[in-house]
Amino acid sequence: MKDHFFPAAIITFCFLALGIALLHNDQIGYGVTLFILLPFTLGLLYGGETVRKWSLGGLLSALSIFILLLLRFRIEGIVCIVLALPIVLGAMALGVLIKYLFFKKKDAKEEKPPTIKATLIPLFLVITVGMVEHELTENDHHVIAVHSEISLPYSPEQVYDAIKSVDTLDAEKPFLMKLDLPIPQKCILEAEEVGALRTCYFEGGLIVERVTELQRGKILRMDVIDYQLTGRDWLGFQEAIYLFDSLENGGCKLTRITTYTSQLYPRAYWKPLEAMGIEQAHEYVFRNLQKDLRKALK
């Protein structure tokens, strides 16, 4: 049965490579087809009775090599792959399970592995569904807001002065930043007035914001007018807001709001993960802010 290994590996690799090629040529999107239907189809092709373990080995080996190539050539980042793996592997496992149950029900002793020719129909169907899905969701942009709050033992004016421009961000990094979530280095506000630009520099890119509302110790609201970060633009940043509220003890409750659009589907899976990533970026800024305030006002 070892002769099942290489056909399975080759066909799997071709499926995955074609999917990524179509994705980066804007023929399909980061949707249900890519994350669920494609891996489910592969699982369905190579599931079966116990002796088909060589086919499954070829599938998983090809998947592993493909992931390494994505990372090596910086086609996708570690964070994207780590977050996508549970849904991809889950869909693949479901395909394997359904094929196994179907094969067991047939009570057959052996089934020939699918040939390259036999995979053309499911591959064509996957591509067709992917293109249709892309057309249906291309302009379906929902604006999502992520809120984070922190209470600080400083006045709203002091917090405002510390956050409007930051020369150096250097704090303990949350988990996703230790992988490859973009790390902000500094944020510079060119002028304290409506219409001014605030530029945040990252390792490997920047985000440019234009001030739309500004009141010291009350609010700092900005529209994101440009962002150049490494990786594919599957998130569209819209607005960045800081709200400063006075507390009874003389402190400040700082609220950070990021609004964005996303190209990732299914939303039930990706929305909580997107929120987690943005909240960790907020957390990093908050940690640096606390450090700067302690240092400046000790």
Image (cartoon, rainbow, N blue to C red):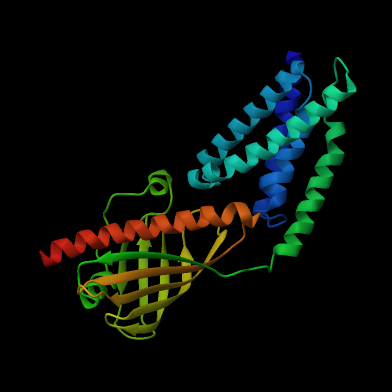
- Please tell me which residue lies in front, 216 or 9: 216
Q: Is residue 245 above or below residue 37?
A: below
Task: Measuring from the top left, give residue 297's x and y in whole percent.
Answer: 12, 67
Residue 220: image quadrant is: bottom left
Q: Is residue 175 above or below residue 57?
A: below
Left or right: 82 in relation to 7: left
Image quarter in which the N terminus is found: top right
Residue lying at 72% horizontally and 36% vertically, measured from the top left: 94
Task: Measuring from the top left, give residue 146's x and y in whole percent.
Answer: 47, 65
Q: Is residue 77 above or below residue 287?
A: above
Residue lying at 43% horizontally and 69% vertically, measured from the top left: 257
Left or right: 268 in relation to 155: right
- Say if residue 42 shows up in the picture: yes
Residue lying at 74% horizontally and 30% vertically, measured from the top left: 97
Residue lying at 70% horizontally and 24% vertically, measured from the top left: 56
Residue 160: image quadrant is: bottom left
- Say if residue 11 shows up in the picture: no
